[in-house]
Amino acid sequence: MSEIGLWRALGQSVRGASHVRAAMPNQDAWRCLPASAEGSRLIVAVSDGHGSARSFRSHIGSSQAVDIAAWVLQDLLDGQPDPLNLSAIKRTAEERLPREIVRRWEEKVAQDRAERPFTAEELAVVVQKHSPKAVEEIQANPRLAYGATLLVVLVTPSFILYLQLGDGDILTISESGEVTRPMPEDTRLFANQTTSLCIPDAWRDFRIRFQALTGEPPVLILLSTDGYANSFVNEEAFLKVGSDVWEILRTEGLEMVQTNLESWLNQASATGSGDDITLAMLCRVNLLPTPEQLAARQQAALPPTGLAVDAGEATPTLTPETPPGTQQLWYDDAGAESSD
């Protein structure tokens, strides 16, 4: 296996500060295939369950979403008779993946509801937080209770596939630290509106990008739920996270990020959106420092880069300096509730 084609994935999901106060579960989820999180072909999926009382089983919906998406993309890889026929793979991805992901997700949430019908207690909370009409909407479309968004990235030696339904962020970072968004903008995503797996014909709202690798691939790809971006004062401050993460990986190594990621995200939620936050990433292994290189730097007592932090200490470049001016709103709040 060519070292340049070797990727490594890592990620962390934390319960939001507001969810801790309200005794609500973490409604985000993330998965990686293969489970080793390393290889020339990797799949990473991130999902964000809707936060309102109407979506009272969204933590289940998001967990099912990432599992299903990862396995559907694995099936795509396994089912290609000619892995070098990129046009055929692109066509299959665009024509089949969204439908298959949504179909399997709908089957799973229907199975969960059949095994565990909605309880009087669950529906009473919906009435209390929303209205009796909200219960009628859930009875007409039970998927509302499980509503979630979805981000998926598949990396291979010859192409990268990006899929997105709803809000959240995918960022790609070049070796020079340039941060870009590979997905086209969806202008419908604003305020409390987002597309979701729970809406009818959700497969139509997927955004897909197939990137054939004719040159150097990105060195780093980040996937995050919108609780992270909403914790920063503006877009520029959030995008800087991409180049800062790469700088830490390049100079301090993967273990530095793994050790500190949970505390960084907890601080971002506490000082920012208050929402659950999930951040997953794929990075090129051949560009990371080796353990021998890191040991040599420590032995030589090289001066700090300005981005490195001690284990357990949060770094300001990856957490918001000030809370954002507005709170996060969810797809199905319809103006009735704010961030939670």
Image (cartoon, grey):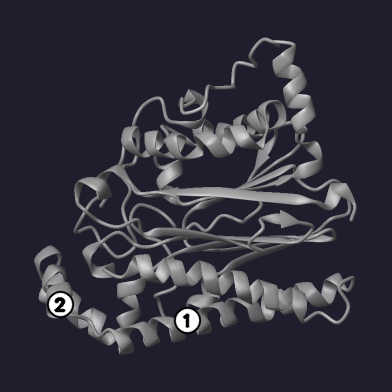
**x then y, percent, for residue 316:** 47, 24
Asked whether, in this view, residue 218 is left or right of residue 103, the answer is right
Which is nearer the eye, 263 or 72?
Answer: 263
In the figure, residue 156 lies in which quadrant? bottom right
Q: 12 left or right of 221?
A: left
Q: Is residue 99 left or right of residue 299?
A: left
Query: Tag 1's secondary structure?
Result: loop
In the drawing, what numbered circle is on residue 133?
A: 2
Spot occupied by residue 311 in the image (x, y as percentages of width and height): 51, 27
Q: Is residue 4 visible?
A: yes
- For label 2, the SS is helix
First-in-chain label (2 vs 1): 2
Name the residue carrying label 1. Answer: 201
Of 126 and 9, nearer the camera is 9
Percent from the top left, x then y, of residue 24? Answer: 25, 56
Task: Identify which amino acid the numbered label 2 is placed on.
Answer: Lys
Give the residue type that dot 1 points to: Asp
Please state which of residues 266 and 220 is positioned toward the viewer in this rendering.
266
- Point 68% across, 32% down: residue: 253
142 w.r.t. 83: above or below:
below
Instruction: Give residue 129's mark.
Output: none
